[in-house]
DNA sequence: ACAATGTATTTCACGAGTAAAACACCTGTT
DNA sequence: AACAGGTGTTTTACTCGTGAAATACATTGT
């Protein structure tokens, strides 16, 4: 059984090797979930490492770019709290990043006139130009990275991931019980 | 056009909303890659957060569990360098983790008799028992998390991710040119 | 044998993220 | 008006990972 149906679609990746090892040690276990979760984690690690390359050229980390991108794509000012929610990071992390990005002249802040607790953050012209300069590179690079999958498979993969993510966000966001 | 073919497979996840925002700002861009890479990253973040729950009950972080798991599934001793490669982390990180895990009595080290630079790390009985106690919980939890996808889709997803990961590891591991 | 080079591991200094406390301010109630 | 409690943001203390230097040892060539 060297070429089963599963082997046709399953590449010779490191996760497959790990799963085989586990099955040898614990033959009864259902290792199905590992083949998805392990691969998602590993793909994320590799993709982030790869994606960081174009960003690093611009002197940005990915979380920094996510923050700038959130401002760019929404098209309006955001408060630190909104930025934290939008970029899925803690408020404290956003505070630090805003400090750095402000010093670099990429974002500006202004206080709210009604509620003096809240701040409004917006891109400077430089910040906006930087995002617009990076984004095409970023997308081109991502296209290259995914080029090994043909368009149909890419579409399938995007759909399945979307379905999974939709469920995860519903469940986990709504308070998943363990 | 409220229910196109794409919308059938694409869940109402946050990445879809982000992509829509980008398309509104930069209508010409091919946002296809974002729908995969963005979702992989977001899924990884949510899954890790979720997975951490069972591990945290055992007082372990995920990198620590990965290290113990590598020892368990290979079934033999590993050197720090091998552990670093196996868990995709830096040597320095492995050194730190080994220090902690040794103090907790979960792993033991022994020097190589031939080459006195290298150390050999193995699980203690406690360490092995801990991994074997956690793993079923872990797999059961992962199954729960993925239960929203029917088995056929799970298989499809695992296959596509395996193909992607296989390519990524070949490319990036072999030195991807930007 | 001895220097030169290479390899395995650890140490160090630092950057980045987090949770929890602190702070500043708002809002509803009495 | 004054206070109690809630919310937005920042600060603090800490942990963890990283890259680069340091360390210790092995190996190769002369």
Image: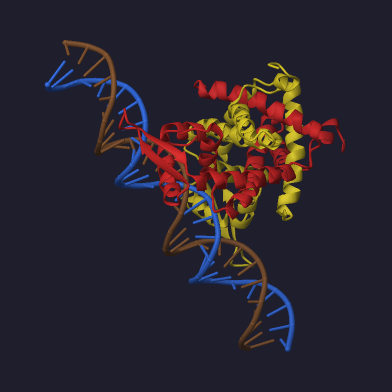
Chain colours: A red, B yellow, C brown, D blue
Side of C11 where B162 appears, left or right: right
Determine the residue positioned at 59% across, 56% down: B80
Q: Quadrant of residue A110?
A: top left
| Rendered location of residue D14, percent (x, y) | 36, 47
Q: Is residue A87 left or right of residue B78?
A: left
Residue A64 can be seen in this image: yes
Does residue C28 appear left or right of residue B141 in this picture?
A: left
Most extreme residue toward the front is: A125
Position of residue A54 measured from the top left corner of the image (x, y, whole percent): 63, 51
Which image quadrant: the N terminus of chain A?
Answer: top right
Q: Please state the horizontal and vertical placement of residue B81, each as a whole percent of the image.
A: 61, 57
Q: Picture quarter containing residue B119?
A: bottom right
Front position in the image: A94 or D4: A94
Question: Considering only vertical position in the picture, is B72 above or below B176?
Answer: above
Closest to the observer, D8 or B21: B21
Q: Is residue B125 visible?
A: no
How many marks can you see? 0
Residue at 66 percent of width and 23 percent of height: A163
- Residue A71 on image: x %, y %: 51, 37
Residue under the point 60% across and 27% down: B17
């Amino acid at each position: 059984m060297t070429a089963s149906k599963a082997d046709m679609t399953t590449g010779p990746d490191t996760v497959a090797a790990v799963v085989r090892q586990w099955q040898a040690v614990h033959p009864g276990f259902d290792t199905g979930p590992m083949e998805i979760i392990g691969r998602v984690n590993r793909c994320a690690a590799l993709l982030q490492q790869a994606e960081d390359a174009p960003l690093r050229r611009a002197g940005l980390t990915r979380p920094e770019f996510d923050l700038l991108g959130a401002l760019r794509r929404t098209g309006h000012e955001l408060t630190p709290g909104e930025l934290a929610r939008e970029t899925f990071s803690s408020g404290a992390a956003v505070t630090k990043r805003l400090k750095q990005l402000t010093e670099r002249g990429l974002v500006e802040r202004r206080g709210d006139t009604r509620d003096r607790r809240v701040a409004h953050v917006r891109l400077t012209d430089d910040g906006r130009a930087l995002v617009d300069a990076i984004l095409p590179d970023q997308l081109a690079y991502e296209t290259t990275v995914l080029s090994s999958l043909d368009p149909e498979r890419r579409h399938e993969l995007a759909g399945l991931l979307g379905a999974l993510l939709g469920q995860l966000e519903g469940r986990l966001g709504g308070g998943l019980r363990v």
